[in-house]
Amino acid sequence: MRGLSLAIDGMELPAIEKISESQAEDPFQVLIATLLSARTQDATTLAASTRLFRRARTPRTMATLSVKEIEQLIYPVSFFRNKARFVKGTCEALVHDHGGKVPTSLDEMVTLPGVGRKTANLVMILAYRSQRNICVDTHVHRIANRFGWVKTTLPEQTERALYESTDARWWPYINLYLVTWGQNVCRPVYPRCGDCAISAVCPRIGVQKVGKSRS
Ligand code: SF4
């Protein structure tokens, strides 16, 4: 993790980190942007979130939008129809059941429509500064297995296993470091092992083919 913290220095931040920074870690905006981000390119998530927040910045105002209007604002994120329903449902639940605020516990957060552990963990880390959560997405799952930190087949298993196999001081940083690394170097297919700053300490578990080196 120390090597990664140096290696990612200067690389572009993942979209949710940018949104979180620009919105002063507002829990509602981190929550909604993370909902939109699933299986969607970072640039698309950023643009869709910006359009949506320009139209409505709070759960109360966003809950008044129709699903159709939300669809139009967030298009072309993937699964935009489902996500629009989740955004609307989540805003209504926040207004009716949580006083218009994002709950501060993971157990309450995962009761919101469309909110899973990945989203809830990221809100806990970015908006509530939790030191006790690990957010596992596809990049974290893949790279933690390549590193040999875990030996798992599903992201949910990876989250549980990482609490056992990693030092707690790194938990809030695992998502930021591994997502940044996964988007830039340790890609899903053809990882750039030849250009990798931490290749000397990486066992490359499961890596069959590597990408062309740029150097
Ligand atoms: S050596 Fe290859 S598999 Fe290991 S972290 Fe670097 S890019 Fe990923």
Image: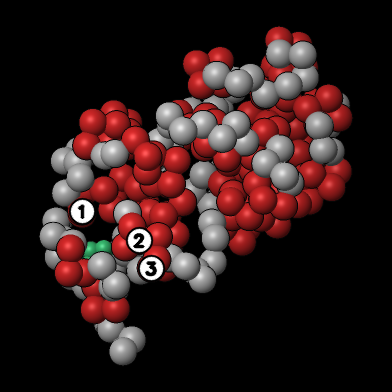
The alpha-carbon separation of the residues under discs 3 and 1 comes to 15 Å
| Farthest-out residue, bottom | 215
Location of residue 74 in the rendering, given as x and y in whole percent from the top left corner = 71, 47
The alpha-carbon separation of the residues under discs 1 and 2 comes to 12 Å
Q: Residues within 10 Å of mark 1 (few under 14, many from 20)?
A: some
Would you identify the image quadrant in which residue 171 lies? top left
* Residue beneath the point at 28% across and 83% down: 213
| Amino acid beneath label 1 | Phe
**The C terminus, quarter of image:** bottom left
- Nearer the camera: disc 1 or disc 2: 2
Label 1 within 8 A of ligand 1 by Cβ: yes
Q: How many marks?
A: 3
Which residue is label 2 attached to?
4
Label 1 or label 2, whichever comes before in sequence order: 2
The alpha-carbon separation of the residues under discs 2 and 3 comes to 5 Å
**The N terminus, quarter of image:** bottom left
